Image (cartoon, grey):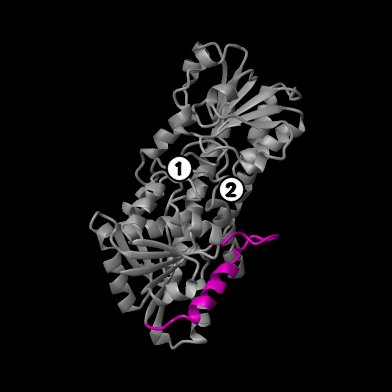
Amino acid sequence: MKLCMIGTGYVGLVSGVCFADLGNDVICVDKDTKKIDQLIKGKVPIYEPGLTELVTKNYKNKRLNFSTNLKKSVKDSDIIFICVGTPTKKHGSSADLSQIYNVAKEISSSINKFKIIITKSTVPLTTGDEIEKILSKKNNKKKFSVVSNPEFLREGEAIRDFIYPDRVVVGSNNKKSNRILKSLYSPLISKGASYLQTSRRAAELIKYASNAFLATKITFINEIANLCEKTGVNVEDISIGMGLDKRIGSRFLRAGPAYGGSCFPKDTKAITSTADKFKSNLSVVKSVIKSNKNRSNLLLNRVYEILGKRIKNKKITFLGVTFKANTDDMRDSSSLLMIPALSKKGAIIKYFDPTGSKKEFSNIKNVYYSKTIKYSLEDSDLVIIHTEWNDFKSINFKNLLKNKKVIIYDMRNIYTPTKIKNQGFKYYSIGR
């Protein structure tokens, strides 16, 4: 099939490359000329394990192409995926849909035969209705079908999530569209993915409801971890005990920093904003947002307690600064609050992250990027394990840290307390 992915961000690029790898002809379109030039040269602008190799392979095999010409790409394709950003509006909580609607207007003038127009971006309830109105101004409704087909890709696991999804959700009552899309996704359905055909509005809400629920699980276990620290209980025992109940499940029950990234922060805000619009109060999700917002401050205060509130000239190492492992995404990472706050109090901070230095810290006083774990640990007073990269799971602190007065604060519970304490270091973790 001939597919057009509009937007080469996380969703558009990963989905486009994976569709090409399944044997489809895919063209990825973006108005960013520099980004398209980089992709043609095989340089991928985001960090995602295995993505560069798939881009190179499918571009070489001519199943994957890149372009800045949206009109031609739409005309040459049968299925159009809208994969542009839907960030939170400035000074608000609702989703900014300006890119979605601008793309819809551009598509409208390029419909030369029957097209399936799909929103792959995460969009609020009724967005598909608005897209249909825009397209109808210039086109007969028989020439297009607007479908909601949300993505469920985790950063760091996106390729696997695409190839082996739990479910494929298609929101459309158009029989022709459903038949074509079921055929498009048949290689994934044959591997065990459930295919759910539903209404367009339901598909839009499924995505938001899923992310809001997962965000709730993370926030819930973080609050339980707070209780565990005050009662001498190991939060990992609680997670295991809860997770064994099949109604609950063990995933997303790991205590740690606040949730961040491209989805949960903006999607929880957007679903509550949509609910308010329809005069329905999502009080649970609103509480999740508030609790998560307080999480980074709580952990920061814990750092102050660990250091005895003597922060000035203390040398602090951050191992990992991204919001989670296997991604270079800094959006809403706890480190964005913690590092500037510690710097303001006079701390000297070194950080190491496998995805390299971060522009977010380039203008902050006394914050330095280290090219190796070993160098980042030199002369450190406090080591904060912020992100659960595999690189940090087998560090021999005894060999690297000569000063036994170094304190280790493991925000991901990577290590067992006895192991680190037996090496002679003070050790703190989350909820235990």
Q: Of tags 1 and 2, which is closer to the observer?
A: 2
Q: Main SS of the magenta segment?
A: loop
Please provide percent x and percent y for residue 319.
Answer: 56, 30
Please provide percent x and percent y for residue 278.
Answer: 58, 70
Q: Determine whether 42 is above or below 378 in the image.
A: below
Magenta region, residue range: 85-113
Question: Going 63% across and 20% down the picture, which residue do you hit?
Answer: 380
On whether residue 275 falls in the magenta region, the answer is: no
Please tell me whether mark 2 sits on a helix, a strand or a loop. Answer: loop
On whether residue 97 falls in the magenta region, the answer is: yes
Question: Going 54% across and 30% down the picture, which residue do you hit?
Answer: 431
Q: Which residue is mark 2?
A: 331
Can you tell which quarter of the image residue 305 is in? top right
Among numbered discs 1 and 2, the one appearing first in the sequence: 1
Question: Residue type at mark 1?
Answer: Phe
Q: Nearer the viewer, residue 327 or 260?
A: 327
How far is mark 1 from mark 2, CA to CA?
19 Å
Question: Going 46% across and 29% down the picture, which residue do you hit?
Answer: 391
Please provide percent x and percent y for residue 66.
Answer: 44, 62
Q: Which residue is mark 1?
A: 252
